[in-house]
Image (cartoon, helix red, strand yellow):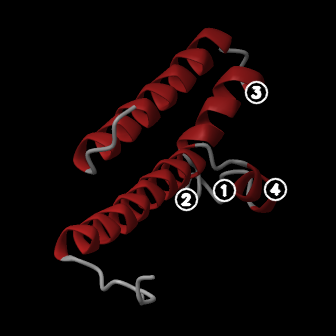
């Protein structure tokens, strides 16, 4: 019979793997948060519209409020759609930039 073997201490290689795994998870979480917050900010409309409708004057007018007004108040649906696609493109570019900077693979 062999003697009971106690817990083995972590070697340096396994410590690096553990720390690397934790850091990879942290970076992935940060990337997800950055993308979601950026997209939510680009599409922020409801709170500002309900409270001020972009006024007084144009002090609180966001790009989304401007898009809404162009499309539905002034009946410029094509122009409103173009601005919406611009917002979508900016969101996509910023999302890909975050993923590139943080080295996240798709």
Q: Is residue 67 left or right of residue 32?
A: right
Residue 70 quadrant: top right
Q: Is residue 49 left or right of residue 105?
A: right
- Which residue is depicted at the point 19% across and 68% down? 13
Q: At which x and y percent is residue 7?
A: 41, 87
Residue mark closest to the camera, 1 vs 4:
4
Estimate the spatial distance between the alpha carbons at disc 3 and disc 1, rounded to whole Å: 15 Å
Q: Which residue is mark 4?
A: 50
- Which residue is depicted at the point 42% across and 54% down? 28
Q: Which residue is mark 1?
A: 55
Q: Which residue is mark 2?
A: 59
Mark 2–mark 1 CB contact (< 8 Å): yes
Whichever of callouts 1 and 4 sits on the residue coming sooner in the sequence is 4
Q: At which x and y percent is residue 68?
A: 69, 32
**Residue 73 badge:** 3
Q: Nearer the viewer, residue 35 or 17?
A: 17
Q: Nearer the viewer, residue 26 or 33?
A: 26
Whichever of callouts 3 and 2 sits on the residue coming sooner in the sequence is 2
Q: Nearer the viewer, residue 57 or 22?
A: 22
Q: Residues within 10 Å of mark 4 (few under 14, many from 20)?
A: few
Estimate the spatial distance between the alpha carbons at disc 2 and disc 1, rounded to whole Å: 6 Å
């Amino acid at each position: 019979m062999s003697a009971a073997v106690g817990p083995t201490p972590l070697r340096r290689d396994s410590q690096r793997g553990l720390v690397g795994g934790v850091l990879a998870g942290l970076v992935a979480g940060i990337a997800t948060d950055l993308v979601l917050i950026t997209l939510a900010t680009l599409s922020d409309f409801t709170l500002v519209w309900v409270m001020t409708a972009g006024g007084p004057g144009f002090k609180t007018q966001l790009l989304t409020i401007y898009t809404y007004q162009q499309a539905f108040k002034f009946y410029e649906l094509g122009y409103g759609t173009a601005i919406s696609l611009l917002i979508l493109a900016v969101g996509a570019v910023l999302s890909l930039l975050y993923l590139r900077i943080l080295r996240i693979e798709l």
